[in-house]
Amino acid sequence: QVQLEESGGGLVQAGGSLRLSCAATGRTSSIPMGWFRQAPGKERKFVAAISWSGGTTGYADSVKGRFTIARDNARDTLYLQMLNLKPEDTAVYYCAGDAGYYPAGYFSSDEEEYEYWGQGTQVTVSA
């Protein structure tokens, strides 16, 4: 069983940056991983995802060019580097793992495909 724990959230001014980490207990090196976020009063939404090989990534349009997803399979750790943060990025950020066997380049933006979830870390961006 895989357990995920996010860290790195906090309060930052608009234009600032944060780096989120997601440490896994259990092996995640062979599964696609993703980041999702949920703003107050809104549904959880896709942010970014990465294939198990790390060779393929995808982003929501709202974060393209500002966020970068990466993984370290040797450490079973997922990252999300966030630059030029905006107040609308304020949300609880969740990392997720998509259990199953997929080609090296596969990832999904559909949260229904993800079986493993962390508890979330709060990111607050002030204007």
Image (cartoon, rainbow, N blue to C red):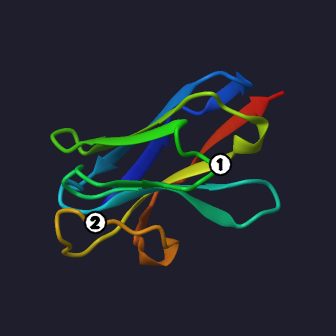
- Viewer-nearest of labels 1 and 2? 1
Seen in the picture, residue 120 relative to 70 is either above or below; the reply is below
The residue carrying pointer 2 sits among few (fewer than 14), some (14 to 19) or many (20 or more) residues within 10 Å by Cα, namely few
Query: Which SS class for mark 2?
Result: loop
- On screen, residue 6 versus residue 93, left or right, reads left
Measuring from the top left, give residue 40's x and y in whole percent.
80, 55
The residues bearing labels 1 and 2 have C-alpha atoms spaced at a distance of 23 Å
- On screen, residue 24 versus residue 108, left or right, reads left
Q: Nearer the viewer, residue 85 or 91?
A: 85
Please identify the quadrant where the N terminus is shown.
bottom left
Please identify the quadrant where the C terminus is shown.
top right
Residue at (28, 58) in percent of width and height: 51
Q: Which residue is mark 1?
A: 92
Q: Nearer the viewer, residue 83 or 95?
A: 83
Q: Quadrant of residue 108?
A: bottom left
Q: Which residue is mark 2?
A: 1
Residue at (74, 25) in percent of width and height: 14
- On screen, residue 8 versus residue 114, left or right, reads right
Q: Which mark is residue 125?
A: none
Measuring from the top left, give residue 18's x and y in whole percent.
55, 27
Q: Mark 1 is on which residue type?
A: Val
Residue at (44, 39) in percent of width and height: 68
Q: Mark 2 is on which residue type?
A: Gln
Query: Which SS class for mark 1?
Result: strand
